[in-house]
Image (spheres, rainbow, N blue to C red):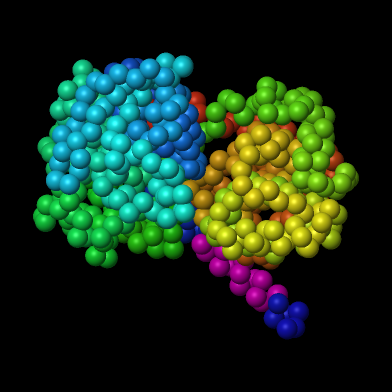
Amino acid sequence: MSARNRTREVSAAKAEALVKTDALRARRRRITQTVVPGDHIERASNRDHRVLFVVSEMADYIKAGGLGDVAASLPRALRDRADMRVLIPGYREVLERTGPIQVIGQTPAHAALPACVIAHTVLDDGLPVYVLICPELYERDGSPYVDAAGEPWTDNAVRFATLSRAAAVIAAGEAGMDWTPGLLHLNDWPCALAAAYVRWSGSKASCLLTIHNLAYQGLFPASLAADLGIAEAQREALDFHGQLSFLRGGIVHADQVNTVSISYAAQITAPAEGCGLDRLLSRRAALGHLSGIVNGIDSSWDPRTDHHLPVHFSVQSCEGRDHNARHVRRAFGLPESRGPLFAVVSRLVHQKGLDLTCDVAPQIVAAGGQLVIIGGGEPQIEAQVRELARRYPGSVSAYIGFDETLARRMFAGADFLLMPSRFEPCGLSQMYAQRFGCLPIAHATGGLIDTVDDGVTGFLFNGAEADALRRCVQRAFRTFRQSGLMAAMRRAAMLRPSGWDIAGTHYLDLYQRTTEARA
C-alpha cells in the first residue's frame, strides 16, 4: 500500500471518528439536560425519602461484579440524607455473614412464585438490610446468577421475579412490615420487573431503574409468563423478539431510568450500543426520563491509609509508589526495571478488549515496558493471556483469578492501567487507578469518556482497534520519559474528585424528580 493510500485511510478513519463523536455529543446534550447539577438539592436533602434499594448482590455479602461495589457504597453515601434500606436475596453467603436476624414480614405466593419470609438485620455501621429468605431459590452453591460450572441457573426467571415481586409487595404495604418505602431503587435486570409489578398492582410507589449494563437484559422464554404472574395483556411491555425481557419491562414501567455515566446514557439511545432497546430509550430520553450519573468509589481507596499496601503514599509524597512497584514485580516474578509498568485488572472477557492488549503487548515489551495481568473469565482469553506470559518471561506475567490485595497493589505500583473496553457503562478500575496515581489508557467509550481527561488524568483513544491502542501506548511511553509531565498527570489523576458524595447528591435530586413524577 502506498503512503498516499495509507494517509487516505487514516484520514477517513479520523473523519469517521469525528462524525461518531459529534453524534454522541448531540445525544449527550439531550441526556445531560435531564441531570440537574444539584444547586437546589436542599429540597431533597432530608430523610423524608423512604427508599428501598433493591439489588441482587452486595459486596458486604457476595459480589459478582461492579454492581456489588455500588450496592455497598451508594446506600451508605445517602443514608444521612434519606431513609435508605436494602433488599437482597437470602443467598447462603448472606445468611452466613449476616449478624442477628429477625423475621419481620412475608410475601404470599403468586402464580408459580413461592411465598417468602422477609428478615431484618443491621450492618455494623447501622445500614438496615432486608433479606428475602426462600431456601429453594437462593441457598445454593455458585454465584447469584450462575452455578458452579458457570451456567445460568435454569430457574433464574422465577428467582428474580420473586425478588421483584417481593419489592412490589413491600412497596404496597402488604408484607406485614411496619415500614413502607415511597420509592423503589431498582438495579439491573434482576430487579427491573418490580417496576412492572408495582404498576400492575396499582401501587402509588415510585420506581427508579438504574441500568448498570444494558447488555444483560434478563431474557427468558415467553412461555414462562403465566408462571411469573404476567397476564396476556401485560406481555407486550416485556416482549423482545418473542422473549420476555425483564429489563425492557423495567424501562417501560419505571418512572425514571438512569445509567451509570452520562456518555453511556447517550450511547444506548443509538443502535450501535442500544442492544435493541435504543428506540425505547430514545423515547424515554425525549420525555426527560433518562439520565446518567457517574458512579463513585468509596473512601477505602486511599493510598495514605489502605491496609493492603506495603507502603503508603500521598499526592504530596509519591515515593511510596516505587516501593509498591517493587512488591508487584516481585509478586509476579518479574525482575526490577527502570521502564514503565503496565497493568490489567479486569474480567478476561471480550467486552474488556483483552485481545487488543495481547496484540499490543509485544510493542510494550520491545520498548522496555513490563505488563502484569490479573483476572479470570472466558477460557479462550485466559489461554491467550497464559500464552503471552509464556512467550515473554521476565516481561509479562499473569495471575488467573482474583486477589483483592494484589489488585490494589497493582493500582498503587503500576504506571499505567490498560482499559481497551469495547464498551464500558461506567467502569470503576480507572477511578481506582487514578486515586492511586496510576494513569488509565482507555478506549473513549461510556463512563471512560466521563472519568478520564485525555492528556490530563490519563489517555483516551478512539476506536476499539489494536492500532489505536498501540498509538496511545506510544503516547504513554513518551509521557513516562518526561518526568515532569508524568508527575503532573499523576497528581491531577490523584486529585480528581471521584467520591460518592457527588454521585449521591445527583441521586438525591433524581429521587426527588422520580417521586414528583408519581405525585
Q: Along the horizontal axis of the image, is 506 left or right of 389?
A: left
Coordinates of residue 106 in the picture (x, y in percent): 20, 28
Q: Judge whether residue 493 can be spotted in this image.
A: no
Q: Is residue 10 magenta?
A: yes
- 487 up-or-down from 423: above or below: above
Q: Is residue 52 magenta?
A: no
Question: Hey, which quadrant is residue 319 in on the image?
Answer: top right
Residue 120 placement: quadrant: top left
Residue 443, image x, y percentages: 60, 54
- In this rendering, the answer to whether 77 lies above or below 434 is above
Quadrant holding the C terminus? top left
Q: Tell me the magenta residue range.
A: 7-20
Q: Which residue sits at x=42%, y=24%?
A: 98
Which residue is located at x 48 percent, y 38 percent?
63
Looking at the image, residue 114 lies above or below residue 265? above
Q: Foreground: 141 or 514?
A: 141
| Residue found farthest to the bottom | 1
Relative to 217, 261 lies left or right: right
Q: Give the x, y percent position of residue 219.
A: 31, 57
